[in-house]
Image (spheres, helix red, strand yellow):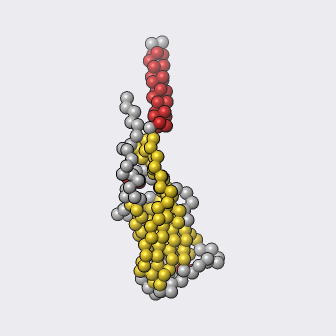
Amino acid sequence: MRALPRVLLLTTTTLLTSGCRKIADTFFVVNAETEQICETERNITFPAAAPEAGTLVHIFEFPLGQIGADLPEGRLDTEFRLRLFELDVTGGGADLSGLEYAKVSLRRPGSAEVIRTLSEYRQPSQAFSPTRLTLRGVEAASVAQLAREDRVELVFEAQGTLPSQEWTADIQACAGLKAEVHYFEFIF
């Protein structure tokens, strides 16, 4: 019977601790959000594709601004939502209707590891435009500590029949960023 009071004390302490943590997470939170950041890269030159080449890769640097600089220290949850990624042929007479698949992925600057694919495209039976490719993100990528970065990289990959002549294009990307900091550290 002597163990019963000890068990009750430990159980009560555990329940109170978890309850206090939930209250602290509710009241000690800072939220920051940018509805939409847009970046455009103009006159990007793409080389003529060799006959056996079937993949095109372009790294697009995307600024996040200073959203994370003003947030307090603590557990930072970040949601990155790609709203628009548009490639528009501006020179060279390239025809993109031979592209079968394209995707845009998110990664940290200088890293080779992709965090998540944000949007994908599979060519429908009837292409919309031979000179423009538009991708829209569906859901947000949740990445811890991402808002502390000043920029990220969007990796554009396309597969299919690529233009056989050199061509130029503009790329525009728009995204929203939401950050939530839980800055209460409860220590026992």
Residue 117 vertical placement versus 184 (above, below) = below
On screen, residue 134 above or below 146: below
Q: Can residue 179 be seen in this snapshot?
A: yes
Asked if one can make out residue 103 in the rendered structure from this viewpoint, the answer is no
**Residue drawn where x is 38% and y is 55% of the image:** 66
Question: Residue at image x 42%, y 47%?
Answer: 76
Q: Nearer the viewer, residue 98 or 27?
A: 27
| Quarter of the image that includes the C terminus | top left
Q: Position of residue 21 (x, y in %)?
A: 46, 33
Residue 150 placement: quadrant: bottom left
In percent of width and height, residue 59 lies at: 41, 69
Q: Nearer the viewer, residue 123 or 71?
A: 71
Foreground pick, 96 / 2: 96
In the image, residue 53 lies at what x, y percent? 46, 80
Which residue is located at x 49 percent, y 30 percent?
A: 19
The residue furthest top is: 1
Position in image of residue 82 (x %, y %): 51, 61
Disc tally is: 0
State left or right for residue 3 relative to residue 136.
left
120, above or below 31, in the image: below
Q: Vertical placement of 82 versus 129: above or below? A: above
Residue reaching furthest to the right? 125
Which residue: 49% across, 64% down? 174
Q: Which residue appears farthest toward the left when viewing the image?
A: 110
